[in-house]
């Protein structure tokens, strides 16, 4: 039996899972930054 | 104030921890990627195939470090949780909860790679051997901690509840491992674990394995610090230091 | 002060359980229904049933226990009496122990008493019956103790019940392994005292450690 697809499958699964695990906080940080920017804009608009 | 005490207190200060994590994590990422490239190149292209298992032994360089990390992270998560509950240090609450998804990810990788390793070696995609069964139970433990944390409306309360659960889990973990291992010998007396762990590993395979072991630890550190930064910003979004940092980022 | 809370609390909980008889009976009926589904689903062949008997009975016991655990603290939480107990100054670990004992008397002990019936249904070999009863008698208190930790952690949550199962089932794995092994060994004529001994040791450990964890979890949930 050719072992290659199983090896590639394992490595690919690891890459996808760890890649997503690494990416998720980055995306979340961007979202939060956007939210805080929005909030600051609204606050300065209210003041000004 | 003694230096140790001072260092301890600094970690408890959110802006300090935020900056520290921001400086350290890129370094860890670079080191992790470098070691991973080196380790995998060595393991996939340079190291020999196994006498018994053939090429599929190369899955070991993913499966074994992942399994090691799945257990190490659970222990660390419980340790952070213990410190958080006993000494009420907010930073360790964050570290504990941020560790959970990373640990779960490694557990999942160990399960998938173990399953794929089993197919060419043993003929089936799933074997109820001691290692895989333990990893499955460990995954459920992780999902329980994450589920409990997310079920609370108040994140701080959820973190403390999940921390307590993690501690209860870590006390039970050796018992679970022992009983699963024992159960496995009862029902499959002649089986060798999918990893082939009892046989001594040749040094040509050992080195890439150890490199990957270190690489995964660096991944954990880097990812943990990144997630910690996100959480710190989320919790302190009305604070001055966060606003200043956001302003700085805009320019 | 400490001794004075245990017995009154135990009596109160037993009285409350008696008043809510139908609610208390439901997990037991569930147990009977689940076990009786197996011959229907798997086929009535006596050999198959005998082979899976221990596992089926014990797993049904786990499921029934988890069902009954959700109500362990919930009604007290909802009417505020749990909060009263926590701030009353009584040693909370003792309070926890009393409530768990009441729970076991009402939910676990009937299970032990029903097990001979289940053993007959599942065609469990004669040698195994006594060990089954002992394994349940020793094991169900552990299920109650560990489950109460999960119950205390989820009592303040709205959908707590389903999460509770996920939380406690991994912790139940060692008990399941040891108990089923003991009974299987007994039916096969092999030694089983080691496994029973380990379950007993587990019970002692749970009795000593779980009440503290339950107390801590209750305090957390009530913050």
Image (cartoon, rainbow, N blue to C red):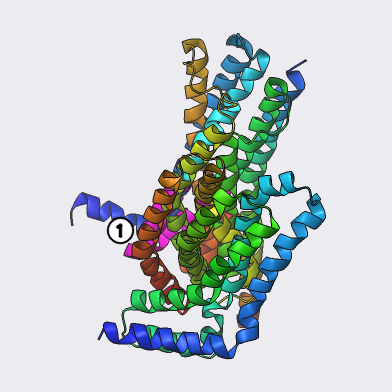
- Camera-side residue of B231 and B24: B231
* Residue denoted by label 1: B9
* Image position, residue B209 (x, y; %): 51, 22
The residue positioned 59% from the left and 40% from the top of the image is B133
User: Left of C154 or right of it: where is A37?
Assistant: right
- Camera-side residue of B103 and B11: B103
Q: Does residue A2 lie above or below C185 as drawn?
A: above
The residue positioned 41% from the left and 63% from the top of the image is B90
- Camera-side residue of C10 and A14: C10
Q: Is residue C125 visible?
A: yes
Task: Find the residue positioned furthest to the front.
Answer: C126
Q: Quadrant of the C terminus of chain B?
A: bottom right
* Image position, residue B56 (x, y; %): 66, 18
Q: Is residue B86 magenta?
A: yes
Q: Is residue B251 visible?
A: no
Magenta: main secondary structure: helix
- Camera-side residue of C30 and A6: C30
Q: Does residue C131 lie above or below C87 as drawn?
A: above
Mark 1 Cα shell of 10 Å, populated few (<14), some (14-19), many (≥20): few
The residue positioned 56% from the left and 60% from the top of the image is C167
Write the start and end of the magenta stretch as one range: B74-102
- Give the chain of mark 1: B
* Local SS, label 1: helix
The residue positioned 65% from the left and 49% from the top of the image is A24
Q: Quadrant of the N terminus of chain B?
A: bottom left
């Amino acid at each position: 039996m050719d072992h290659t697809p199983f090896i590639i499958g394992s490595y690919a699964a690891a890459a996808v899972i760890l890649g997503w695990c690494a990416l998720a906080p980055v995306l979340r940080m961007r979202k939060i930054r956007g939210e805080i920017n929005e909030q600051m804009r609204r606050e300065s608009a209210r003041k000004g | 104030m003694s230096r140790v005490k001072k260092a301890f207190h600094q970690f408890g200060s959110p802006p300090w921890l935020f900056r520290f994590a921001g400086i350290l994590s890129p370094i860890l990422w670079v080191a992790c990627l470098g070691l991973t490239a080196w380790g995998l190149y060595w393991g996939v292209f340079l190291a020999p195939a196994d006498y018994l298992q053939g090429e599929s032994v190369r899955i070991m360089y993913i499966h074994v470090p992942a399994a090691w990390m799945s257990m190490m992270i659970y222990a660390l998560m419980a340790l952070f949780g213990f410190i958080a509950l006993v000494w009420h240090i907010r930073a360790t609450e964050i570290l504990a909860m941020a560790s959970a998804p990373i640990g779960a990810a490694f557990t999942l990788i160990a399960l998938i790679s173990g399953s794929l390793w089993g197919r060419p070696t043993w003929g089936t995609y799933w074997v109820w051997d001691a290692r895989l069964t333990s990893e499955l139970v460990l995954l459920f433990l992780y999902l329980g901690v994450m589920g409990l944390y997310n079920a609370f409306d108040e994140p701080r309360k959820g973190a403390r509840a999940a921390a307590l659960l993690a501690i209860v889990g870590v006390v039970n973990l050796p018992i679970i491992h022992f009983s699963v291992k024992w159960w496995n010998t009862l029902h499959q007396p002649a089986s060798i674990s999918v990893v082939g762990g009892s046989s001594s590993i040749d040094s040509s395979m050992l080195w890439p394995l150890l490199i990957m072991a270190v690489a995964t630890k660096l991944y954990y550190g880097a990812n943990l610090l990144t997630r910690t930064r996100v959480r710190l910003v989320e919790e302190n979004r009305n604070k001055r230091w966060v606003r200043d940092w956001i302003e700085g980022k805009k320019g | 002060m400490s001794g004075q809370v245990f017995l009154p609390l135990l009596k109160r909980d037993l009285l409350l359980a008696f008043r809510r008889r139908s609610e208390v009976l439901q997990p037991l009926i569930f147990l009977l229904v689940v076990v009786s589904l197996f011959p229907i689903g798997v086929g009535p062949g006596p050999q198959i049933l005998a082979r899976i008997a221990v596992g089926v009975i014990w797993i049904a016991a786990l499921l029934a226990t988890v069902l009954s655990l959700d109500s362990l603290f919930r009604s007290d939480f909802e009417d505020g009496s749990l909060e009263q107990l926590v701030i009353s100054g009584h040693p909370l670990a003792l309070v926890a122990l009393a409530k768990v004992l009441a729970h076991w008397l009402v939910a676990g002990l009937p299970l032990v008493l029903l097990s001979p019936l289940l053993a007959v249904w599942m065609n469990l070999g004669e040698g195994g019956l006594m060990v089954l009863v002992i394994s349940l008698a020793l094991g169900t208190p552990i299920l109650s103790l560990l489950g109460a930790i999960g119950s205390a952690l989820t009592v303040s949550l709205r959908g707590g019940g389903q999460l509770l199962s996920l939380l406690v089932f991994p912790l139940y794995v060692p008990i399941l392994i040891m108990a089923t092994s003991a009974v299987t060994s007994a039916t096969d004529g092999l030694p089983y005292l080691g496994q029973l001994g380990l379950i007993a040791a587990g019970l002692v450990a749970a009795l000593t450690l779980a009440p503290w964890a339950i107390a801590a979890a209750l305090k957390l949930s009530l913050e």
